[in-house]
Image (cartoon, rainbow, N blue to C red):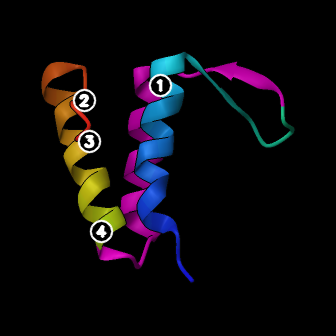
């Protein structure tokens, strides 16, 4: 079962709380730029259409307004 559709929401959760984890499980600051990079990467690698559309919407909202309305 593919759960890629949840990843954009997890990226935005990390952005709201202000931190995330790197590959070595160290806590790092989650910035707008890092969130944009992760969303852009997800758009390129996922085969799940819902994940791709959510990531595109979140990325566009971050670029335009600097924040995302999640519904």
69 lies left or right of 1:
left
Residue 48 falls within the magenta-colored stretch: yes
- Real-space CA distance between mark 4 and mark 1, rounded to the nearest whole angstrom: 20 Å
Query: In the picture shown, does residue 65 fall above or below 58?
Result: above
Label 2 or label 1, whichever comes before in sequence order: 1
- Residue at the spot of label 4: 50
Check disc 2 and report the residue beneath it: 68
Q: Position of residue 6 (x, y in %)?
A: 46, 57
Disc 3 to disc 4, C-alpha distance: 12 Å
Region in magenta: 26-49
- Residue 68 lies, in percent from the top left, at 24, 29
Quadrant where the C terminus sits is top left
Residue at image mark 3: 58
Q: Which residue is mark 1?
A: 15
The answer to whether the residue labelled 4 contacts the one labelled 1, judged by CB atoms less than 8 Å apart, is: no
Q: CA distance from mark 2 to mark 4?
A: 17 Å
Task: Determine contact: label 3, label 4, CB under 8 Å.
Answer: no
Q: Secondary structure at mark 2?
A: loop
Q: Main secondary structure of the magenta part?
A: helix
| Residue 44 picture location, percent across and down | 39, 65
Q: Is there a contact, CB below 8 Å, between mark 2 and mark 3?
A: yes
Residue at 20% over, 48% down = 57
Kindly report the distance in space between the C-alpha atoms of the residues bearing marks 2 and 1.
Answer: 10 Å
User: What is the distance, in whole Å, between disc 2 and disc 3 at their CAs?
Assistant: 6 Å
Q: Count the marks: how many?
A: 4
Can you say whether 5 is above or below 68 in the image? Answer: below
The Cα–Cα distance between marks 3 and 1, rounded to whole angstroms, is 12 Å
Q: Are marks 2 and 1 in contact (CB under 8 Å)?
A: yes
Residue 60 is tagged as none
Q: Residues within 10 Å of mark 2 (few under 14, many from 20)?
A: some
Q: Judge whether residue 60 is colored magenta.
A: no
- The quadrant holding residue 54 is bottom left
């Amino acid at each position: 079962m593919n759960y890629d559709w949840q990843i954009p929401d997890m990226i935005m959760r990390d952005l709201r709380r202000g931190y995330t984890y790197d590959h070595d499980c160290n806590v790092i600051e989650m910035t707008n730029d890092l969130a944009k990079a992760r969303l852009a990467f997800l758009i390129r690698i996922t085969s799940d259409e819902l994940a791709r559309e959510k990531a595109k919407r979140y990325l566009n909202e971050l670029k335009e307004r600097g924040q995302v309305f999640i519904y």
